[in-house]
Image (cartoon, rainbow, N blue to C red):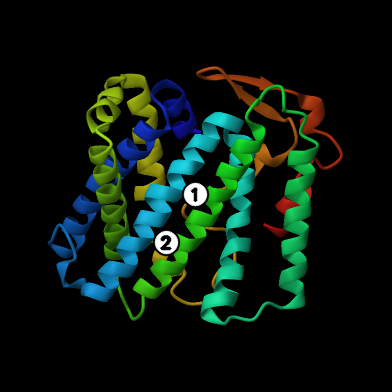
Amino acid sequence: MCFTLGGRRVGSASVNLGRLLMAWVLLVLLHLALYGSVFPCQAGGPRLGWLGLSGLIGFALGDAVLFEAFLLIGPRLAMLLMTLSPLFSAILAWLFLHQALSLARIGAMAVTLLGIAWVVGGDGDSGTHPHLGRGILLGMGGALGQSVGLLCSKFGLAGDYSPVSANLIRASGGVLALLLYFGFTRTLGSTLAALKDGRATSFIALGAVTGPHAGRGPFPGRHRQGPHGRGRHPDVPLPRPPVARGSCRLQGAGGWSCNPRDAAGPGGRGSPVFCIG
């Protein structure tokens, strides 16, 4: 929500770069306090490569399209589409990690897809979101990017490696990729200049502290063991209440419109996703 509010003022590109820079600084300070160094230089080439690639795909590319989806279709539908991330992760694990897909898991995937299709197909938001199709594709791209990034981080976490150090490497890879991209396209100055908007920067900072820093710091360690794709994806918190069809909508730069009838409907559309999540 913080990133959506900030993005509507300064654009998704400034949000993505700004929040990742803020989170990177916080992670550096945390790493310095815990391990006495600003960067885990002893990680080794292969680990740096996998974790850096994870940050490039998950933080830079995946989040870039996700933030654009926030602006096109709103956080409610965008975050609903992020529930596809465990599904993508399970398929990638089947392809690259040779993890079995049981009938129960396949059935859960089908229910997830049906639930998302039910919400999106019956949402009636085509007038509110004139770019609904593009937003859906971007939201799915964000989910896929996070899943691919998580797969790369699983390779980079081989052995007993610190999740804080791993996440700092991932964030560094994302920051470097974004700086190189904006520098190459000669938009770095304008992207950073947009962060002079104090209100937008406050929203971005709040999202950075509660997301990439506090929320993601320990997450790689939780996926060192266990089947890839089980449970929700940790990179982007998935709030449950907005799944219900039409319960509350964000309008303008910070206003809300709620429909109690839709929110209190027969379970609310999206209940299947709620149940299996």
Q: Position of residue 18 (x, y in %)?
A: 31, 36
Circle 2 Cα neighbour tier, 10 Å, few/some/many (<14 / 14–19 / ≥20):
some
Vertical relation: 221 (above or below) 263: below
Vertical relation: 53 (above or below) 246: below
Q: Position of residue 144 (x, y in %)?
A: 54, 56
Q: Is 245 left, or right, of 200 in this rendering? A: right
Name the quadrant of the C terminus: bottom right
Q: Is 225 left, or right, of 138 in this rendering? A: left
Q: Secondary structure at mark 2?
A: helix
> Between 33 and 46, which is closer to the camera in this rendering?
46
Task: Quote the CA–CA distance across marks 2 and 1.
Answer: 11 Å
> Between 242 and 33, which is closer to the camera in this rendering?
242
Residue receiving disc 2? 219
Q: Which mark is residue 236?
A: 1
Mark 1 is on which residue type? Answer: Val
Q: Quadrant of residue 40?
A: bottom left
Is any part of residue 80 visible from this angle?
Answer: yes
Residue at the spot 72% in from the left edge and 52% down from the top edge:
273
> Between 62 and 250, which is closer to the camera in this rendering?
62
Residue at the spot 73% in from the left edge and 48% down from the top edge:
116
First in sequence: mark 2 vs mark 1: 2
Q: Secondary structure at mark 1?
A: loop
Residue at the spot 47% in from the left edge and 70% down from the top edge:
223
Q: Residue furthest front?
A: 185
Q: Is 24 left, or right, of 8 in this rendering? A: left
Vertical relation: 217 (above or below) 187: below
Circle 1 Cα neighbour tier, 10 Å, few/some/many (<14 / 14–19 / ≥20):
many
Q: Position of residue 56 (x, y in %)?
A: 35, 55
Mark 2 is on which residue type? Answer: Phe
Q: Quadrant of residue 47?
A: bottom left
Q: Which mark is residue 158?
A: none
Is any part of residue 217 visible from this angle?
Answer: no
